[in-house]
Image (cartoon, rainbow, N blue to C red):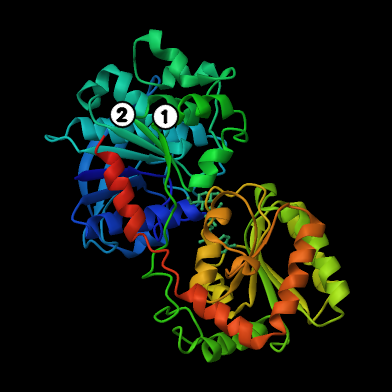
Amino acid sequence: MEIIHLSAECYPVAKVGGLGDVVGALPKYQNKLGHFAKVVMPAYQSKFLRENEFEAVYDGWSKLGFHSFPVRILREKNNKLGFDLFLVHIPGLMDRDMVYGYTDDTERFLAYQIAVLDWMAQWEHRPDVVHCHDHHTGLVPFMMANCQQFRVLSQIPSVLTIHNAQYQGQFGWDKLHYIPAFDLWHAGQLGWTGAINPLAAAIKASWRVTTVSPSYLDEISYHANGLESLLAQERSKSVGILNGIDNEVWNPHSDPMLEKKYAIRTADSGKKANKEALCRVFNLNPDRPLFTFIGRLVGEKGADLLPDIFYNALMQANGEMNVLVLGSGDPQVEGRLNHLKGQFPGNYNVFIGYNEQLSHQIYAGADFLLMPSRVEPCGLNQMYALRYGTIPIVRRIGGLKDTVVDIGDGGFGICHDQTSVWDVNHAMGRALDLYRDNKRIKEIRKLMMQLDHSWDQAAQQYIDLYQI
Ligand code: ADP
Ligand code: GLC
């Protein structure tokens, strides 16, 4: 099958969170199964663009409302990622440093989607499926089905994967003229509660909808930032497929970013060496248990509670515990997390920012990784932690519920029910008890490192789904 993935992120080209990881891996695994999966994404001003070779495969003009803009599509020449990568260059709109966060994001991502469809409409053949990821590509299924200029694409099946229904990309009806001409009779398909809503439009117009874990599919029928009833209505075409991880990128045995590589057999000494290196950099004593958090500092991740969680835990532990945080987001949370450094020198540290290498080093060097998420459609951090022999402490929600089994139930993680300071502190108490039992830790480490969360299975599940 020929599968076209459309996404705003794709690791290592551009990554803000887990979406990048998924789109950087799934196509590679689909190709291993004998298919032709390709990624078509915006050309940001990225290191990847500067450091690799590209050839132009298309030059054209597209229109956003009354405004025409030039488009160049670049193809990466050496199949470096294990799939064909196409970058959509739109001067002035896409060639910026960040992926998101600009006041004209609506215009940027609409221009990208229109440019892709203009290009695809000129192909001499039709792909078997167009797979859209999140709201940045959410108007594609509607435009393929309804816009006159894309009529030749109308019979291509479209699939939407919802990575996070909290973000929907809404904009006002005053921008309706941005969307290429279609029979206005269908305009209702674009809207939800008074605005044009790309995620809602994609849920309505795509042939199939997927979520990134089965539990999240259940949860969004009562918690989806306003889309609950729509999702319930479209449930018959929806399926939850648990994300995998890229076992080649996330492999402690071959990870070039680590101080010391290790396998299951050498996990004890390997983790010890990585912990020591990490603790040296962050002025922490490696003999103490190391609790960590990696992620976006936003309410969804429970990040607003982290300062209180760590304050309580560190006070109670009386110096016998370390905490290390890597993340960025809400400036207030960043400020409070920074403030703790002065209160617990030698026991607590934080790196505010985004640092891919440090994230690998933390997964390898930590004893425990916290994920007190309020919403977690899948979550990849816990799967990376498992692969690196780090015990996840997670709230039972979404993909966390689907991937982490509590040690009390014969599993390998520590689970709690609520995103509350009390619940997380209690879970950390259980972790401290566990830490004292070295033999048990070793058994659990072995158990979790043996788990297989690779994409092999999920890649096939998507292929089965495409046979619509
Ligand atoms: P989400 O996509 O909701 O942020 P996921 O758990 O799916 O959450 O994926 C997060 C990804 O982003 C993981 O690869 C994680 O290691 C990475 N990540 C998050 N924050 C940072 C950071 N500050 N520095 C480096 N990597 C980060
Ligand atoms: C989203 C979700 C996260 C998921 C990721 C990849 O960012 O918040 O839970 O793991 O997408 O699907």
Is residue 197 visible in this depiction of the protein?
Answer: no
User: 242 or 359: which is nearer to us?
Assistant: 242
- Which mark is in front, 1 or 2? 1
Mark 1–mark 2 distance (CA, rounded to whole Å): 36 Å
**Going by the picture, which residue comes out furthest to the top?**
185
What residue sits 31% from the left and 41% below the top?
A: 465
1 or 2: tag closer to the N-terminus: 2
Is 302 placed left or right of 201 in the picture?
A: right
Q: For mark 1, what is the residue?
A: 236
Q: Amino acid at mark 1?
A: Ser
Q: Element type at marker 2?
A: strand
Q: Position of residue 137 (x, y in %)?
A: 41, 36
- Could you say which is closer to the camera, residue 266 or residue 451? 451
Task: Categorize mark 1 by other alpha carbons within 10 Å: few (<14), some (14-19), many (20+).
Answer: few
Q: Is mark 2 within 8 Å of ligand 2?
A: no
Residue at the spot x=43%, y=57% of the render?
21
